[in-house]
Amino acid sequence: MTNKLNVLSDSALMAADTAHHLHPFTDYKALAAEGSRVIVRAEGCTLWDSQGNAILDGMAGLWCVNIGYGREELADVAARQMRELPYYNTFFKTTTRPATELATRLAELTPPGLEHVFFANSGSEANDTIVRMVRRYWQLHGQPERNVIISREYAYHGSTLVGASLGGMSAMHSQTGLPLPGFEHIRPPYYLRDGGNMTPQEFGVAAAQALEERILALGPERVAAFIAEPIQGAGGVIVPPDSYFPEIQRICREYGILLIADEVICGFGRTGNWFGSETFGIEPDLMTLAKGLSSGYLPISAVMVGDRVARTLIDEGGEFFHGFTYSGHPVACAVALENLRIMQDEGLVERVRDDIGPYFQDRLRELADHPLVGEVRGVGLIAGVELVRDKDGPVFFQPEGRVGTICRDHCFRNNVIMRAVRDGMVISPPLVISHAEVDRLVETARRCFDLTQADIGL
């Protein structure tokens, strides 16, 4: 039987999409008016749409296609595994070879002390799992009232009810009566907005001390954990001063609370180390992994569990009533293993640290002379370019988000994908991006900033 959609014209396919497909994080009325752009193939850092336009993907999909598109090795591994064992669960005291091999590999790659792995299918599911584990841990220690988890404004930890509650995105909270009870948020280390007359080092300590203030306000006996992305990605690429995480680590240890590093974006080479925790000197009790684990080729995520929590769950916990049908899916695990092999064999993490990462950051910082650019910030192959009304102050645009959206749309029309967060452009290309592609990205960004400036009359 022929699939009717395979022979539809672009216009018919777009009409079918509007009629039947509810996209994530989308204004449905606006999408219905404009229609979807149909992506048909990809190679390296380039996407092609159905009109034949070549599009430079400055966001690696959604922060995830680290080794680039079109890697036949991953397709071949997936096909072999599907033929051999397409699926079996890891419930009922069973495992599969890919799941066990991947767990072993992750225990080797991640920072010392993270020896145990729980598999899920997305960052949201992994963070839901962490909340369950953290609260179970304190329950087993006879402190069930210790169930509050502290996060930060602009944090993104997923879009399930628990993930969105962990996160600090006010727009998500406003639509669905969130956060759920037991979740608190403190200010982020957002120096451009909040640094004032402090040096970055002074501000980093002050921002971290907001955690101690909240712990004392709530009562230390109620606080279970603190969760943080090494760099806040979807919150606008907020890069903490060097003084921030050492103070966070001190506070967590002083009050005995668990420290969770959400490495969904920063993990697997993005910051020039395998994990952002290494870049910023974080020693987490639990770590969230997803996205770059398979370079987005198949859905998979993982929770790395440190000895403190794992030994309690194993030795005292009995059955842990939590899991997913596809936890440790053998095909996803096989693809993730091959993805990690490619990253290691091709030296992609070292390339980000020593070559393409410094080049990318240097080129982007040339944009700082543009009248709209208030700050360029980033590490490795992740960056944010904040657009402001006036560099002095700085003075931010109002209403928030309008100018960023205008600039994003100019980027799309000029066939470079960058994402807008508030009034900043965030960029996170595949780790295989070339110097020439970085040049194209920066040149297009400058052109789009000029177009945006003309549109808003500045």
Image (tube, rainbow, N blue to C red):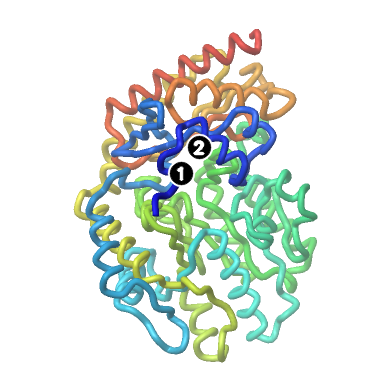
Specify whether 356 is left or right of 115.
Answer: left
Q: Where is residue 101 in the image (x, y as percent from the top left)?
A: 30, 73
Q: Mark 2 points at which residue?
A: 13
Q: State the SS at label 1.
A: helix
Specify whether 109 is left or right of 138.
Answer: left
Decide: marks 1, 2 in contact (CB < 8 A)? yes
Q: Residue at 64%, 59% (x, y): give it.
A: 160
The residue lying furthest to the left in this view is 345
Q: Quadrant of the C terminus?
A: top right
Which quadrant of the structure image shows residue 219?
Answer: bottom right
Tell me which amino acid carries mark 2: Leu
Q: Residue at 57%, 84% (x, y): give it.
A: 320
Tell me which amino acid carries mark 1: Leu
Q: State the SS at label 2.
A: helix
Q: Is residue 161 above or below residue 113?
A: above
Q: Where is residue 46 in the image (x, y as percent from the top left)?
A: 34, 34
* Distance (Cα) linking label 1 and label 2: 7 Å
Q: Residue at 66%, 33% (x, y): give it.
A: 193
Specify whether 42 is left or right of 254.
Answer: left
Q: Mark 1 points at which residue?
A: 5
Q: Which of 322 and 311 is in front in this view?
A: 322
